Image (cartoon, grey):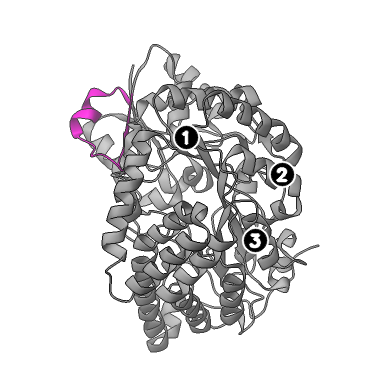
Amino acid sequence: MKALLIYPEFRAPSFWNFRETCKLTDARYTTPPLGLCTVGAMLPEDWDVRLVDRNVEPLEDSAIREADIVFLGTMIAQQPDCLELIQRIKAIGKTVVVGGPDPTSSPHIYADADHLVLGEGEVTLPMFLEDLAAGAPKKIYQSEAKANVQTTPVPRFELIKLDRYSYIGLQWSRGCPFNCEFCDIIELFGRVPRAKTPEQIVREMQKVYDLGYRGHVSFLDDNFIGNKKLVKQVLPEIKRWQEAHDWPFEFTTSATINLADDIELMKTMQEVGFFSIFIGIESPDEETLIDTQKPQNAHRSIAQSVQKIYAHGMFVIAGMIVGFDSEKQDVAPNMVECIEAASIPAVMAGMLAATPNTQLVRRLRAEGRLHEDFDRQGDGEGDHCTTGLNFVTIRPRTEILRDYLQVIESIYKPNAYFDRVLRVGLALDSSKRPFKIQARQKRLELKALWRATRRLGFAPGVWRPFWSTAFQLARKNPKSLRYAGLMMGLYLDLGPFSNYISREVRRAIAEEERNPSKTASRRGRETLSVAHRTPLAG
């Protein structure tokens, strides 16, 4: 069998694309499709497997014609391209198999695919392959069972061209112990984190190393510290491997803010080589955090927690959300104040979106507030920054839009952004960096520095705070300058994208003011059946 694996394109403008930042090091996209690399490793050994990532290379019809079967793996942001690919592949006469988070949550959208392999691939893909070998594959394969990730094979990273990406992703664990109402992670992967063995993750690191890769590796876990006991078992093994190979990798990941409560864990992560953490902060409002079932962020100083992480050499990228039911009218200034107090430069701020297969969706549907096509992603639409609020809001929609606009236009002003970079750079403890920059990476980073300086160092409105930040850090904390430089480079994407959001939100506000009822119902809502929030059970 000749199998073609295709990763659909992320077309929509998004905080997460970082296209311009990628160009600084001649990369074409951020990270390769780890899921499809893993699928490739689960296919029969005698199959001829090829992988095409539409984000870094074109897909020729000849590649489809040469294949016996085509696999697509997709997330909601890739939905438009995936749906077009299904039609393109079927027009050529080939069998198309679709899986991934979005098909699992909204299989009806992908009904035109020949086969849907839903849920976790380690569970359902073998079922499909067995029936395929017997000549009787079914339309849909799904299971509520959770995969034993300790049987997951080493991903076939040799199927991709590593130098086309900014960094490489690995996954050590799945699941999260918390219960956030708006999150689909716990629905897809459960609330009991499952982790690979230390030996497994070391084998995956060795595979990437043997392919010649050096540099940034991101653990793409839902919550890397979901099981702290297991984390503290795997980190020493990663450290031993790093020491034996002269520290070729440095790491990033996602975690919850209670990381700041564990000094021992932060010290160990710093010693292993972690330099950045994504944390979903969501809201500075205690009532909202409790209401949306995110108590781990409540009853604490967000700023103090973030500063503790900085003191252990890791800078924070944060997620923030506007549009929760319990928000008050002062949400925007409070959110800006929280971001400034915590000195977080890169903030992925979006409007609340009801994501398929979540508690939030089930509640909104029961309350009659969910838009009919809430799970449809329009072609060219942005992420939750411009396509959130896919439900009937409690507060007037224009108020939420104006609050969101205030947040975006405040935090991404050049002076505000680079001032936060300066404060992070001064607070960041980079004195214990074990990572060894290899010659090739050093050349790439020097090239990136030159390109970023040419673009930011002479840009109107940007050049003054850019140079001021760089000179002060070079004088006061030069060891953090490399990481502060990365944060400054991100402004090549964050600055223009924030301007795009501003234009789109202003347009939405004008449309809402012209015809509120039309705007509120454009996805199929005819009447507002609920005038107030139904309290959550428990």
Disc sitting over residue 238 in the figure: none
56 vs 362, left or right, is: left
Q: Mark 3 or mark 1, which is nearer to you?
A: 3
Disc sitting over residue 35 in the figure: 1
Is 66 contained in the magenta span? yes
Q: Which residues are drawn in magenta?
A: 50-69
Disc 2 target residue: 265
Q: Secondary structure beneath disc 2?
A: helix
Of marks 2 and 1, which one's residue comes earlier in the chain? 1
Q: Estimate the spatial distance between the alpha carbons at disc 3 and disc 2, rounded to whole Å.
A: 15 Å
Q: Residue at x 74, y 70 (%)?
A: 535
Q: Secondary structure beneath disc 3?
A: helix
Label 2 crowd (10 A; few <14 / some 14-19 / many >=20): some
Give residue 509's quadrant in the image. Answer: bottom left
Q: Which amino acid lies under the numbered mark 2 shown in the image of this protein?
A: Leu
Disc 3 target residue: 306
Q: Residue at x 61, y 30 (%)?
A: 238
Q: Estimate the spatial distance between the alpha carbons at disc 2 and disc 1, rounded to whole Å.
A: 28 Å
Q: Which amino acid lies under the numbered mark 1 shown in the image of this protein?
A: Gly
Q: Residue at x 48, y 53 (%)?
A: 483
Q: Could you tell me how many numbered marks the image carries?
A: 3
Q: Quadrant of the C terminus?
A: bottom right
Q: Which amino acid lies under the numbered mark 3 shown in the image of this protein?
A: Val
Is 370 contained in the magenta span? no
446 vs 479, left or right, is: left
Q: Position of residue 468 (x, y in %)?
A: 41, 70
Q: Quadrant of the N terminus?
A: top left
Q: Is 270 drawn above or below residue 530 in the view shown?
A: above
Q: Position of residue 122 (x, y in %)?
A: 56, 27
